[in-house]
């Protein structure tokens, strides 16, 4: 009868390293999530406006203010929780949900098909969050 034996050298050290990683993982994930939120905020800020439409006879051309682009914020709400929001307002009234969609992606009828939808654009950046997590974990193991 044959017998084979395997042994992991320094098994206790391996177990200790795994416990340390488990302790560090929430902080690693939180850092990656917040960095991703900041990068996504920058992406949204740089996202182009649609071409301005030609004004109807007797009306002034609409002047772009850049307010929508410049009011993106990435904010930590708690451990592992971030918000990416736009706080653009005119005369005290918030308007981004009409233009780039509310939480469900619904826009005011006059913006449908002309303006991009924030939820779709943010979702397009989710692969970057995976990459950030991989990067942070890679640094932890190196």
Image (spheres, rainbow, N blue to C red):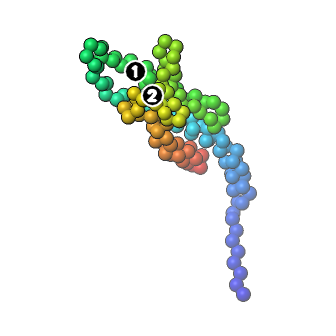
Q: Which residue is drawn at 27% across and 13% down?
A: 58
Q: Which residue is drawn at 58% across and 28% down?
A: 75
Query: Quick one: SS at disc 2?
Result: loop
| Residue 117 on image: x %, y % | 45, 34
Disc on the earlier residue, 2 or 1: 1
Mark 2 surroundings: few (<14), some (14-19) or many (≥20) residues within 10 A: few
Mark on residue 19?
A: none
Mark 1 surroundings: few (<14), some (14-19) or many (≥20) residues within 10 A: few
Query: Quick one: SS at disc 1?
Result: loop
Taking the image as shown, residue 52 lies to the left or right of residue 4, namely left
Q: Which residue is drawn at 34% across and 17% down?
A: 63
The nearer-to-camera label among 2 and 1 is: 2
Residue underneath mark 2: 108
Q: Residue at x 30, y 14 (%)?
A: 60
Compared with residue 43, is residue 2 higher up or lower down, i.e. above or below?
A: below
Compared with residue 15, is residue 132 higher up or lower down, i.e. above or below?
A: above
| Residue 46 on image: x %, y % | 40, 30
Instruction: Determine if residue 7 is in view.
Output: yes
| Residue 28 on image: x %, y % | 61, 41
Q: Spatial distance from mark 2 to mark 1, Cα to Cα? A: 19 Å
Q: Which residue lies furthest to the right in this view?
A: 12
Taking the image as shown, residue 59 lies to the left or right of residue 83, namely left
Closest to the observer, 37 or 119: 119
| Residue 37 on image: x %, y % | 53, 34
Taking the image as shown, residue 59 lies to the left or right of residue 19, namely left
Residue underneath mark 1: 66
Instruction: Determine if residue 43 is in view.
Output: no
């Amino acid at each position: 009868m044959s017998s084979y034996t395997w042994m992991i050298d320094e098994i206790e050290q391996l177990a200790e390293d795994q416990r340390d990683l488990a302790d560090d993982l929430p902080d690693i994930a939180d850092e990656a999530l917040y960095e991703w939120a900041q990068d996504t905020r920058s992406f949204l800020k740089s996202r182009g406006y649609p071409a301005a439409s030609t004004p109807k006879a007797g009306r002034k051309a609409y002047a772009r203010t850049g307010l929508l682009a410049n009011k993106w914020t990435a904010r930590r709400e708690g451990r592992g929780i971030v918000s990416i929001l736009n706080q653009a307002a005119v005369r005290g009234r918030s308007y981004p949900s009409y233009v780039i969609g509310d939480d469900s992606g619904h826009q005011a009828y006059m913006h449908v098909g002309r303006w991009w939808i924030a939820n779709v654009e943010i979702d397009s950046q989710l692969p970057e969050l995976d990459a950030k997590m991989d990067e942070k974990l890679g640094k932890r193991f190196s």
